[in-house]
Image (cartoon, grey):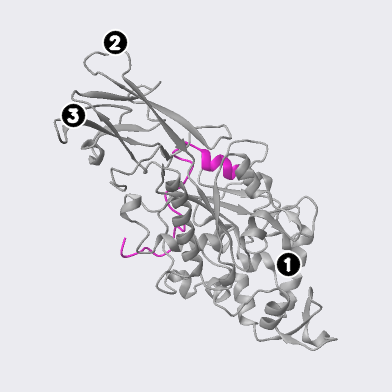
Amino acid sequence: MAANITTYRNGTIADGVSKLILLVYSNNPLQFSINDTMADDLINGTLSSLNQSSNVNKKLSSTTVVSPQNISNGKSVTIAVYTPPDSFNNQDTGSNITINVNISDPNNPDARTLYELPIKLYRPPVVLVHGLWMNSENTWVENNCTKINFTKTMTDNGFYYAFADYEEHNSETFDPCYNVFGNYGINSIRTTIHDILGQYHYFSIAASQVDIVAHSMGGLMARGFVQQPDYKRKDNYMKGSIRRLITIGTPHFEGPLAKSLYEHRDDWYCTDGIKVTTALNCKVEPKKLRTIYADNFNSCIDKGGIEALVPKSNAYSRLYQTNVKSYAIAGTWKPNANESYKSQETYYRTITDKDDFNLDNTLDGDNDDNDLVVSATSQLGGLPKQTRQLNSNDVPDHSALYCNTVHTDFYIQDKGIFSETNSPYIQNDVIRLLSSSDKNKFADAIGIGSPCNPSK
């Protein structure tokens, strides 16, 4: 078992993995049954004997009969194993529900219940991962005095979250093979998962997995974490640390605008602190593009992150298809963010010194939808393109495309446009997705079409 049998727990999380051992002193067989459920109703979890729990061919059930085992001094115990469901089947906003396990005499079904054992079932914790040049605060909480209600929405709906913040290294590569611990972003995910699960354990809650919600390059960090040699361990039953992965605006396949920035990093431009112009129009001393980004935007284009996002980079070649339950959320500026689009296109015409630079064509040669930074094709990671109908509470399976939604608040020049993490539609759908018990809602993998990991 993942935990020592002497470790006391009063509950577990709904990850389908974090088991509990139910131990009752008895010299007679006992029947363990989840209250108010039929034997084939698994909505609140399953029960099995200690021996049956490792039998993958055993039919799952919410009831089991367990024979006693001798321990010492003439005493005997019956031991059942409770396996939680893999979803929190509760539409309320609470953080936990109580599952009652009835313990009775299997030879006398009409007799009263001998014991009733309450088990607290909690929502899995959520780890939030930011992207390139960003941090947790300006991605999920507040950006330039603009309230981003993502974390408030999660708290209001009973979710407990933690930030995987790698702000000091947010200009660096997502390459999963960058160093011995993956890279700094990957290690922030690893450390945050360890810490937040440790908090659950401190409060006597069994917990082996988390949900991850990641924006932009943070989704690539999460995928890279799955490739690390310590991802599957005994303490997560060799199932890995992630129950569900939701990526938002993630460039799963490429970031063509990164190519423009990287190729022109040593070209000369002028800036007034906000607007960048060509060196020919300078009224002040020109600077290299890399210097302008570092000095004025606190964003480095020569630290590895931008180079990694260039199509067909070494970093992308080492990022494999990620076989984790996944959902891709994508944004598109269309149809109404026209001024935002013109501003972004004009900027890159300046950077590339090409009057005919076309943003849509650059991001995807087929004039695909995009969020002004990443094409919808890249954001969807090989999952289907399905426009989210905002007048419906039904979230499409596997993936969704949100109109009038751009990558971050920085790009908004029109009214009625949302950034991806500040969209109330996306925020509410993330809650729906994390709470869903629909087995088909999440895809089995993301980054479909990426290289296959030869070691898997």
Of tags 1 and 3, the one toward the viewer is 3
User: Which quadrant holds the C terminus?
Assistant: bottom left
Of tags 2 and 1, the one toward the viewer is 2
The kind of residue tagged 2 is Asp
Q: Which residue is mark 1?
A: 344
- Badge 2 or badge 1: first in the primary sequence: 2
Q: Residues within 10 Å of mark 2 (few under 14, many from 20)?
A: few
Query: Disc 2 to disc 1, how far (Cα)?
Result: 73 Å
- Badge 1 or badge 3: first in the primary sequence: 3
Dividing the picture into quadrants, the one containing residue 170 is bottom right
In this rendering, the answer to whether 221 lies above or below 89 is: below
Give the residues drawn in magenta, as a range: 429-456
Rendered location of residue 193, percent (x, y): 46, 55
Q: Which residue is mark 2?
A: 110
The reply to whether discs 3 and 2 touch (Cβ–Cβ < 8 Å) is no
Q: How many marks?
A: 3
Given residues 171 and 99, the one toward you in this image is 99
Identify the disc placed on residue 68: 3
**SS type, badge 2:** loop
Residue under the point 51% across and 66% down? 185
**SS type, badge 1:** helix
Given residues 178 and 264, the one toward you in this image is 178
In this rendering, the answer to whether 231 lies above or below 282 is: above
The kind of residue tagged 3 is Pro
